[in-house]
Amino acid sequence: MSDLPLERTRNIGIMAHIDAGKTTTTERILYYTGKSYKIGEVHDGAATMDWMVQEQERGITITSAATTAHWTDTVNKVDHRVQIIDTPGHVDFTVEVERSLRVLDGAVAVFDGVAGVEPQTETVWRQADKYHVPRMCFINKMDRTGADFFGALKSIKERLNAKVAVIQLPIGAEAEYAGIVDLVTMQAWVWNGEELGASWEVTDIPADMVELADEYRQELIDVLSETDETVMEKFINEEELSPAELRAALREATLNHGLVPVLNGTAFKNKGVQPLLDAVCFYMPSPLDLPPVDGTDRKGEPITRAPEDDEPFSALAFKIMTADHVGKLTYFRVYSGKITKGDQVLNTRSGNKERMGRLLEMHAKDQIEQEWVGPGDIVAAIGMKDTRTGDTLCDPSAFIQLESLEFPDPVIHVAVEPKTKADQDKMSKALVSLAEEDPTFQVRTDEETAETIIAGMGELHLEVIVDRMLREFKVDATVGKPQVAYRETLTQEVIKHTYLHKKQTGGSGQYAKIVINVIPTGPGGGFSFEDNITGGRIPKEYIPSVGHGVEEALTSGVLAGFPMVDVRVELTDGDYHDVDSSEMAFKIAGTMAFKEAARKAKPTLLEPIMNVEVVTPEDYMGDVIGDLNSRRGKVGKMEQRGANQVIDAEVPLSEMFGYSTDLRSKTQGRANYTMHFGSYQATPRSIQEEIVARVTGR
């Protein structure tokens, strides 16, 4: 697709906590790389990357928009292709971050110069660790009142446990912020204004900063000498290191996850973006810098694919979207081989071949048609009917299964009801389409009430879904009160529980006898079924049926019908009848035996506990803590951040509905909070009885 050699491609994500300035940074990158002629501001609802109506109204990024830009670095004057994915910082949309990081080669983490590391920063940092993504930090908003580069740097070291390489220092701060000191070249970049496209000059370091710059450059050489022999030798011999040598050592250390370069700027005031782009070209990996992608063949044996044109085609579909006029778009990352539009690929999950329709290079919601795509390309295809997020697409004659994506289960659900009969059919289509796009959004029908239930990662997540149903699919729906996704588990072992399933109705009957042990596996232990039968007490072909029966019983627990988790079932003994036994008889026995044993095993209710962080002026601390305690919250650590206090707490999700309104009124709108799912924990007995009575009517 690109005329440039692959070593000049950079696939990067821009990630951060909500409001750190990610989207504004991306907008500036697009402007300075010539992709965006009129700059968009998030606060006036015109940002190029935030192209959904919901995003423009809320001023946050919900879906990962992909775009391709070109940048000629200011040192070597070499053209690079930069493919950027802007990811959301709101915790309800972490799945977008997760799937973007899976297909990226490097990431820029954007920090608010006032707040430093925030809760969602920690979440996305952990996600980047999981996928071994090399990254660099951009401390943004250096023009804001209270901006503190060194405070933000300290929080990156302490809270993210990052080994940093400071490669720039800020010149001034807050309203006096003027530019940066480049510690690699030991020169200053000073911008001549704050307007778009403002020119800058490279000049001598201000006299009052020379000592500090020398100190930090020495620190940079120190950390590089730990990872690079050339730097080490020159350091020992007290020889001067050239900028090119420092860049080479820093690139190597960044790619090997040894160091994280730290830069600074203010994207909104147009300062620091060009050196950030240079750093992306200098220190972020090309697809060739990474090891070949791992996968398995049809037998499950490990195989790899290198990013070469002549390797068999392999790609990972990481996002499905519906776009106006073109229908379903399948975003995918090519790992190896080339493909031309109209070619067939194999979907390894379904086993079906699909034809690649049009191939599109994406710029937010604009598309540029491509004849072919190759290694390292991140593009979208039209015409793929049965491809889902996480599917591997490969050459039909060269099977490979790439590692798929894992998504968390939803923690909140609401009932939705169409307002009219005409809305009913449209709603079904809309929900199917939205669930295809978003693996953390689930739809089901309640068997007892026949209501349609939608489930997601938080209130905002479901609000956006309902909003999209109305705007994009013209479905008017009534939404019920949010409900918590409770779970059930067991607290006691039940050993040698016997169950006999026997029915005689004329003709062949039903007969199955089983003996099971039911053992709690503890939080996060998951479900397992073990066959401990010896001596052929039950024929082999019936044993999986017992397991299927138990799995069916797990979907509706014995307390209040919530899914049951974290239990091991061991099948230890049993009996069968030559004529009357069948797979169905043993499946029924599995279901009934488990339900009986579960009632004896002291079942308990689990509820989702959220990790909540509240940032509040000190004056309101007492009210905020008192309110969290009244919500059954456990207040953890408290710390000062600038002029505010930060309170960490664990609070049951059921107690957090409507919290934003209450927090606003208690603090006159001066406090804010973030929360994300922490863990499932046992519900107190009194609350449990209330919930069970409400759900079961007993």
Image: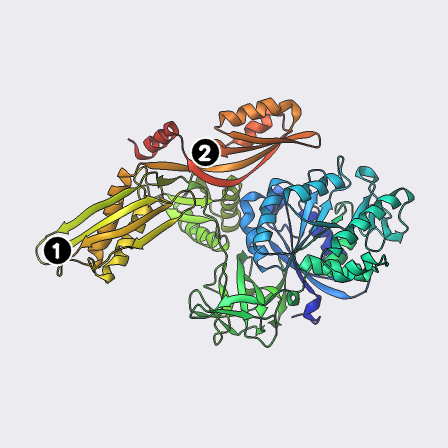
Q: Depth check: 237 or 311 in front?
A: 237
The answer to whether 642 is drawn above or below residue 542 in the figure is above
For the N terminus, the image quarter is bottom right
Position in image of residue 610 (x %, y %): 50, 37
Where does label 1 land, which residue?
Answer: 509
Where does label 2 land, which residue?
Answer: 654
Q: Residue at x 59, y 52 (%)?
A: 129
Q: CA distance from mark 1 to mark 2?
A: 48 Å
Residue 191, visible in the rendered structure: yes
Amino acid type assigned to the residue bearing label 2 in the image: Ser
Mark 1–mark 2 CB contact (< 8 Å):
no
Q: Residues within 10 Å of mark 1 (few under 14, many from 20)?
A: some
Position in image of residue 692 (x %, y %): 33, 33
Q: Residues within 10 Å of mark 2 (few under 14, many from 20)?
A: some
Secondary structure of the residue carrying tag 1 is loop
Q: Is residue 641 left or right of residue 179?
A: left
Tell me which corner region of the image, top left, top right, bottom left or bottom right, holds residue 153.
top right
Q: Depth check: 111 or 246 in front?
A: 246
For the C terminus, the image quarter is top left
